[in-house]
């Protein structure tokens, strides 16, 4: 399953939504040289954080017609290892779902190795 993403930045990076349900979301990004930091072969931390944020945002509230239904209130990421490889993936999980705020967690892997953990708070928005 590849869900349509209307977010131009996510599309530019090449992020794909692989799976989404009420418990969370899984997204993926094929690693390419223009995503490296100044250390050859290591993905920039901002890319890793973006992937975690996308997974958590999609998991917090499903997009409607490709448009997000929540925004990030705050997020934190812990980098465990350099992301080196071919495929970066993030799997998010709902920790707590409130009326207007959703607390999320994400684990980011690179070729199956855990490279980062993130948490975030997301607020529902009314796009009508």
Image (tube, rainbow, N blue to C red):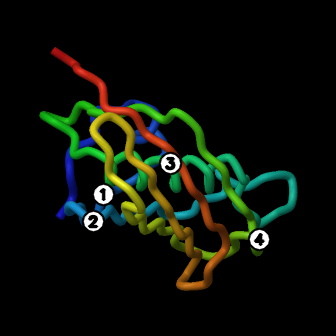
Which circle's residue, 3 or 2, is located before the other in the chain? 2
Callout 2: SS: loop
Return the residue nearer the eye: 80 or 70: 70
User: Mark number for residue 53?
Assistant: 3
Marks 4 and 1 close (CB-CB < 8 Å)? no
> Dividing the picture into quarters, in which one does residue 42 lie?
bottom right
> Dividing the picture into quarters, in which one does residue 93 lie?
bottom left
Which residue is found at the position 70% from the left and 73% from the top? 84
Return the residue nearer the eye: 101 or 10: 101
Which residue is found at the position 62% from the left and 66% from the top? 117
Which circle's residue, 4 or 1, is located before the other in the chain? 1
The residue positioned farthest toward the bottom in the image shown = 112
User: Mark number for residue 23?
Assistant: 2
Label 1 environment density (alpha carbons within 10 Å; few <14, some 14–19, many ≥20): many
Callout 4: SS: loop
Where 47 sits versus 25, above or below?
above
Q: CA distance from mark 3 to mark 1?
A: 12 Å
Mark nearest the camera among 3 and 1 is 3
Which circle's residue, 3 or 1, is located before the other in the chain? 1
Q: CA distance from mark 2 to mark 1?
A: 14 Å
Mark nearest the camera among 2 and 1 is 2
Q: How many marks?
A: 4
Which residue is found at the position 86% from the left and 52% from the top? 38
Q: CA distance from mark 4 to mark 2?
A: 28 Å
Return the residue nearer the eye: 68 or 39: 68
Which residue is found at the position 27% from the left and 38% from the top? 99
Q: Which residue is mark 4?
A: 82
Which circle's residue, 3 or 4, is located before the other in the chain? 3
Picture coordinates of residue 24 (x, y %)? 32, 63
Picture coordinates of residue 123 (x, y %)? 39, 33
User: Mark number for residue 17?
Assistant: 1
Marks 4 and 2 close (CB-CB < 8 Å)? no
């Amino acid at each position: 399953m590849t869900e349509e993403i209307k977010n131009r930045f996510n599309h530019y990076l090449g992020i794909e939504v692989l799976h989404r349900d009420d418990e969370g979301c899984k997204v993926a990004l094929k690693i390419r040289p223009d995503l490296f930091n100044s250390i050859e072969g290591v993905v920039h931390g901002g890319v890793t954080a973006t992937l975690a944020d996308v997974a958590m945002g999609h998991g917090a509230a499903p997009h409607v017609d490709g448009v997000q239904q929540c925004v990030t209130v705050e997020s934190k990421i812990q980098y465990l290892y350099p992301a080196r490889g071919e495929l970066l993936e993030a799997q998010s999980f709902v920790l707590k779902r409130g009326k207007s705020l959703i607390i999320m967690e994400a684990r980011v892997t690179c070729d199956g190795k855990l490279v980062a953990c993130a948490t975030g708070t997301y607020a529902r928005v009314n796009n009508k």
